Image: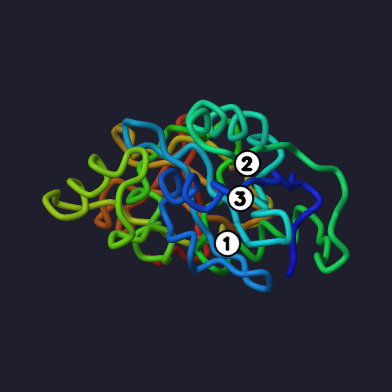
Amino acid sequence: MKISTGHSIIQISGIDSAEFLQGQITNDINLASNDKFIDSAICNVQGRVISLFMVRKDAEGFQIIVDSSLSDKLLHHLKKYAVFFKTEMTIINTIPKELVLVSDQQWAKDCIEKGKVELNDDLSEKFTPHELNYHNNEIINFQKGCFTGQEVIARMHYRGKLKFTLARFKTESPSSLIRGDLLTNYMGKNIGQVLMFIKNEGLMSLKNSSHLENDIYTNKKEKVNFIYKSII
Protein backbone atom coordinates (compact mmCIF):
# COMPACT_ATOMS: atom_id res chain seq x y z
CA MET A 1 0.00 0.00 0.00
CA LYS A 2 1.41 3.36 -1.04
CA ILE A 3 1.26 6.82 0.48
CA SER A 4 3.26 9.90 -0.43
CA THR A 5 5.83 11.90 1.48
CA GLY A 6 3.23 14.69 1.51
CA HIS A 7 0.69 12.69 3.51
CA SER A 8 -0.07 12.65 7.23
CA ILE A 9 -1.63 9.82 9.24
CA ILE A 10 -4.50 10.42 11.65
CA GLN A 11 -5.05 7.59 14.14
CA ILE A 12 -8.66 6.99 15.20
CA SER A 13 -9.08 4.73 18.23
CA GLY A 14 -11.81 3.76 20.71
CA ILE A 15 -14.83 1.47 20.78
CA ASP A 16 -17.10 3.95 18.98
CA SER A 17 -14.67 4.75 16.16
CA ALA A 18 -16.52 2.84 13.43
CA GLU A 19 -19.90 4.27 14.41
CA PHE A 20 -18.46 7.77 14.61
CA LEU A 21 -16.74 7.65 11.22
CA GLN A 22 -19.78 6.11 9.56
CA GLY A 23 -21.73 9.26 10.40
CA GLN A 24 -19.07 11.57 8.98
CA ILE A 25 -17.48 10.11 5.86
CA THR A 26 -19.01 9.76 2.41
CA ASN A 27 -18.07 6.10 1.95
CA ASP A 28 -19.08 3.02 3.95
CA ILE A 29 -16.54 2.44 6.73
CA ASN A 30 -17.50 -1.25 6.76
CA LEU A 31 -15.71 -1.63 3.41
CA ALA A 32 -12.35 -0.76 4.97
CA SER A 33 -10.10 -3.56 6.19
CA ASN A 34 -6.60 -4.07 7.57
CA ASP A 35 -5.18 -4.74 4.11
CA LYS A 36 -7.44 -2.45 2.09
CA PHE A 37 -7.71 1.33 2.00
CA ILE A 38 -10.93 2.85 0.75
CA ASP A 39 -11.17 6.36 -0.67
CA SER A 40 -13.59 8.65 1.10
CA ALA A 41 -14.24 12.31 1.74
CA ILE A 42 -15.39 14.60 4.51
CA CYS A 43 -17.80 17.41 3.63
CA ASN A 44 -19.08 20.47 5.46
CA VAL A 45 -22.77 21.04 6.14
CA GLN A 46 -23.12 22.87 2.81
CA GLY A 47 -22.03 19.71 1.01
CA ARG A 48 -18.61 20.99 -0.05
CA VAL A 49 -15.58 18.75 0.21
CA ILE A 50 -13.16 19.51 3.02
CA SER A 51 -10.79 16.69 2.13
CA LEU A 52 -10.34 13.47 0.23
CA PHE A 53 -8.45 10.76 2.12
CA MET A 54 -7.80 7.03 2.38
CA VAL A 55 -8.93 5.04 5.41
CA ARG A 56 -8.22 1.51 6.62
CA LYS A 57 -8.65 -0.57 9.76
CA ASP A 58 -5.77 -1.26 12.11
CA ALA A 59 -5.27 -2.85 15.52
CA GLU A 60 -6.34 0.31 17.38
CA GLY A 61 -9.23 1.35 15.15
CA PHE A 62 -8.66 3.18 11.89
CA GLN A 63 -5.95 5.11 10.11
CA ILE A 64 -6.73 8.07 7.84
CA ILE A 65 -4.14 9.06 5.23
CA VAL A 66 -4.62 12.70 4.21
CA ASP A 67 -2.74 15.49 2.44
CA SER A 68 -0.53 17.07 5.11
CA SER A 69 -1.79 20.57 4.36
CA LEU A 70 -5.25 19.45 5.53
CA SER A 71 -4.39 17.17 8.44
CA ASP A 72 -4.92 19.77 11.19
CA LYS A 73 -8.11 21.05 9.58
CA LEU A 74 -9.54 17.55 9.19
CA LEU A 75 -8.60 16.61 12.75
CA HIS A 76 -10.26 19.78 14.10
CA HIS A 77 -13.42 19.06 12.07
CA LEU A 78 -13.66 15.48 13.30
CA LYS A 79 -13.15 16.45 16.93
CA LYS A 80 -16.14 18.81 16.76
CA TYR A 81 -18.41 15.84 16.06
CA ALA A 82 -16.69 13.31 18.34
CA VAL A 83 -17.87 14.67 21.71
CA PHE A 84 -20.65 12.08 22.06
CA PHE A 85 -18.51 9.10 21.09
CA LYS A 86 -15.85 7.06 22.86
CA THR A 87 -13.12 7.76 20.37
CA GLU A 88 -9.75 9.50 20.32
CA MET A 89 -7.84 11.07 17.45
CA THR A 90 -4.27 12.15 16.97
CA ILE A 91 -1.72 12.71 14.20
CA ILE A 92 1.02 10.09 14.35
CA ASN A 93 4.57 10.43 13.05
CA THR A 94 5.55 6.78 12.70
CA ILE A 95 4.99 5.31 9.26
CA PRO A 96 3.75 1.69 9.47
CA LYS A 97 6.27 -0.66 7.87
CA GLU A 98 3.72 -2.08 5.43
CA LEU A 99 3.23 1.34 3.81
CA VAL A 100 5.47 2.32 0.91
CA LEU A 101 6.47 5.98 0.57
CA VAL A 102 6.54 7.51 -2.91
CA SER A 103 7.39 11.06 -3.96
CA ASP A 104 4.75 13.79 -4.10
CA GLN A 105 5.27 14.04 -7.86
CA GLN A 106 4.74 10.33 -8.41
CA TRP A 107 1.64 10.38 -6.21
CA ALA A 108 0.16 13.34 -8.09
CA LYS A 109 0.91 11.66 -11.43
CA ASP A 110 -0.84 8.47 -10.28
CA CYS A 111 -3.89 10.47 -9.11
CA ILE A 112 -4.08 12.29 -12.43
CA GLU A 113 -3.93 9.02 -14.37
CA LYS A 114 -6.71 7.57 -12.21
CA GLY A 115 -8.83 10.72 -12.37
CA LYS A 116 -8.78 11.02 -8.58
CA VAL A 117 -8.74 14.59 -7.26
CA GLU A 118 -6.88 15.00 -3.97
CA LEU A 119 -7.50 18.48 -2.59
CA ASN A 120 -5.04 20.64 -0.67
CA ASP A 121 -5.70 23.51 1.73
CA ASP A 122 -6.09 26.04 -1.11
CA LEU A 123 -8.97 24.07 -2.69
CA SER A 124 -10.66 22.78 0.47
CA GLU A 125 -14.40 23.56 0.78
CA LYS A 126 -14.58 25.06 -2.72
CA PHE A 127 -16.13 22.13 -4.60
CA THR A 128 -19.04 19.74 -4.32
CA PRO A 129 -18.29 16.01 -4.72
CA HIS A 130 -20.01 16.05 -8.13
CA GLU A 131 -17.69 18.76 -9.42
CA LEU A 132 -14.80 16.44 -8.56
CA ASN A 133 -16.46 13.35 -10.08
CA TYR A 134 -16.46 11.59 -6.71
CA HIS A 135 -19.91 10.12 -7.40
CA ASN A 136 -18.41 8.08 -10.27
CA ASN A 137 -15.24 7.01 -8.43
CA GLU A 138 -16.76 4.95 -5.58
CA ILE A 139 -15.98 7.74 -3.12
CA ILE A 140 -19.62 8.41 -2.21
CA ASN A 141 -21.90 5.60 -1.07
CA PHE A 142 -25.52 6.73 -1.33
CA GLN A 143 -26.80 3.56 0.37
CA LYS A 144 -24.78 3.83 3.61
CA GLY A 145 -26.99 6.37 5.39
CA CYS A 146 -26.49 9.91 6.61
CA PHE A 147 -23.23 11.83 6.82
CA THR A 148 -22.43 15.52 7.18
CA GLY A 149 -23.60 17.34 4.04
CA GLN A 150 -25.47 14.25 2.79
CA GLU A 151 -28.84 15.95 2.23
CA VAL A 152 -27.35 18.62 -0.03
CA ILE A 153 -25.26 16.10 -1.96
CA ALA A 154 -28.12 13.60 -2.39
CA ARG A 155 -30.49 16.34 -3.57
CA MET A 156 -28.00 17.36 -6.23
CA HIS A 157 -27.43 13.75 -7.23
CA TYR A 158 -31.06 12.72 -7.60
CA ARG A 159 -32.80 15.97 -8.48
CA GLY A 160 -30.16 18.23 -9.98
CA LYS A 161 -29.18 18.57 -13.62
CA LEU A 162 -25.52 17.63 -13.44
CA LYS A 163 -23.40 19.41 -16.03
CA PHE A 164 -20.06 19.32 -14.25
CA THR A 165 -17.20 17.62 -16.07
CA LEU A 166 -13.88 16.36 -14.78
CA ALA A 167 -11.32 16.27 -17.57
CA ARG A 168 -7.78 15.00 -17.90
CA PHE A 169 -5.43 17.07 -20.03
CA LYS A 170 -1.89 17.53 -21.26
CA THR A 171 -0.37 20.81 -22.30
CA GLU A 172 2.53 21.79 -24.46
CA SER A 173 5.62 21.91 -22.27
CA PRO A 174 6.52 24.09 -20.52
CA SER A 175 3.21 25.49 -19.26
CA SER A 176 2.45 28.44 -17.00
CA LEU A 177 -0.52 26.63 -15.43
CA ILE A 178 -0.51 26.03 -11.69
CA ARG A 179 -2.88 24.18 -9.40
CA GLY A 180 -5.89 26.34 -8.53
CA ASP A 181 -5.77 28.47 -11.69
CA LEU A 182 -9.18 29.66 -12.83
CA LEU A 183 -10.10 28.86 -16.43
CA THR A 184 -12.17 31.11 -18.68
CA ASN A 185 -13.65 31.20 -22.16
CA TYR A 186 -12.57 33.76 -24.76
CA MET A 187 -14.92 36.34 -23.20
CA GLY A 188 -13.28 35.99 -19.79
CA LYS A 189 -16.21 34.10 -18.21
CA ASN A 190 -15.20 31.59 -15.54
CA ILE A 191 -15.75 28.05 -16.84
CA GLY A 192 -13.69 25.94 -14.45
CA GLN A 193 -10.50 25.44 -12.48
CA VAL A 194 -7.27 23.45 -12.50
CA LEU A 195 -7.45 20.88 -9.69
CA MET A 196 -4.17 19.01 -10.01
CA PHE A 197 -1.15 19.70 -12.21
CA ILE A 198 2.30 18.18 -12.47
CA LYS A 199 4.81 18.95 -15.23
CA ASN A 200 2.49 19.20 -18.26
CA GLU A 201 -0.53 17.09 -17.28
CA GLY A 202 -3.40 17.55 -14.90
CA LEU A 203 -7.09 17.45 -14.00
CA MET A 204 -9.59 20.26 -14.39
CA SER A 205 -13.20 20.70 -13.35
CA LEU A 206 -15.42 22.37 -15.94
CA LYS A 207 -18.92 23.68 -15.43
CA ASN A 208 -20.10 22.12 -18.69
CA SER A 209 -18.62 19.48 -20.98
CA SER A 210 -19.19 21.74 -24.00
CA HIS A 211 -16.27 23.90 -22.84
CA LEU A 212 -13.91 21.11 -23.89
CA GLU A 213 -14.77 21.82 -27.51
CA ASN A 214 -13.62 25.45 -27.36
CA ASP A 215 -10.46 27.37 -26.59
CA ILE A 216 -9.69 27.71 -22.88
CA TYR A 217 -7.81 30.58 -21.24
CA THR A 218 -6.37 31.25 -17.81
CA ASN A 219 -7.64 34.09 -15.66
CA LYS A 220 -4.50 35.93 -16.86
CA LYS A 221 -6.08 35.81 -20.36
CA GLU A 222 -3.40 33.44 -21.63
CA LYS A 223 -4.61 30.74 -24.02
CA VAL A 224 -3.85 27.22 -22.82
CA ASN A 225 -2.20 25.16 -25.53
CA PHE A 226 -3.45 21.61 -25.03
CA ILE A 227 -1.98 18.46 -26.54
CA TYR A 228 -5.22 16.77 -25.58
CA LYS A 229 -8.16 17.11 -23.19
CA SER A 230 -10.73 14.42 -22.50
CA ILE A 231 -13.64 13.77 -20.16
CA ILE A 232 -13.06 11.22 -17.41
Three-letter residue code for mark 1 = Ile
Residue 117, horizontal then vertical, whole percent = 52, 53
Q: Are marks 1 and 2 in contact (CB under 8 Å)?
A: no
Select label 3 or label 1 by which is in front: 1
Q: Residue furthest left?
A: 159
Query: What is the spatial separation of the Cα atoms under label 3 and label 2, in whole angstroms?
Result: 11 Å
Q: Residues within 10 Å of mark 1 (few under 14, many from 20)?
A: many
Three-letter residue code for mark 3 = Phe
Of the numbered discs in the image, which one, if any, rests on residue 188?
none
Q: Residues within 10 Å of mark 2 (few under 14, many from 20)?
A: few
Q: Secondary structure at mark 1?
A: helix
Residue 112 sits in quarter: bottom right
Three-letter residue code for mark 2 = Ser
Of the numbered discs in the image, which one, if any, rests on residue 176?
2
Taking 167 as reference, is 94 above or below it? above
Q: Are marks 3 and 2 in contact (CB under 8 Å)?
A: no
Viewer-closest of 224 and 144: 144
Q: In this image, 48 relative to 86: left or right?
A: left
Query: What is the spatial separation of the Cα atoms under label 1 and label 2, in whole angstroms?
Result: 18 Å
Q: Which residue is mark 3?
A: 197
Q: Secondary structure at mark 3?
A: strand
Residue 173, horizontal then vertical, whole percent = 66, 56
Viewer-closest of 107 and 15: 15
Say whether disc 3 or disc 2 marks the residue closer to the N-terminus: 2
Q: Which residue is mark 1?
A: 112
Q: Secondary structure at mark 2?
A: loop
Q: In this image, 21 relative to 166: left or right?
A: right
Select label 3 or label 2 by which is in front: 3
Looking at the rendered image, the quarter that the N terminus falls into is: bottom right
Say whether disc 3 or disc 1 marks the residue closer to the N-terminus: 1
Q: In this image, 164 relative to 19: left or right?
A: left
Residue 27 sits in quarter: bottom left
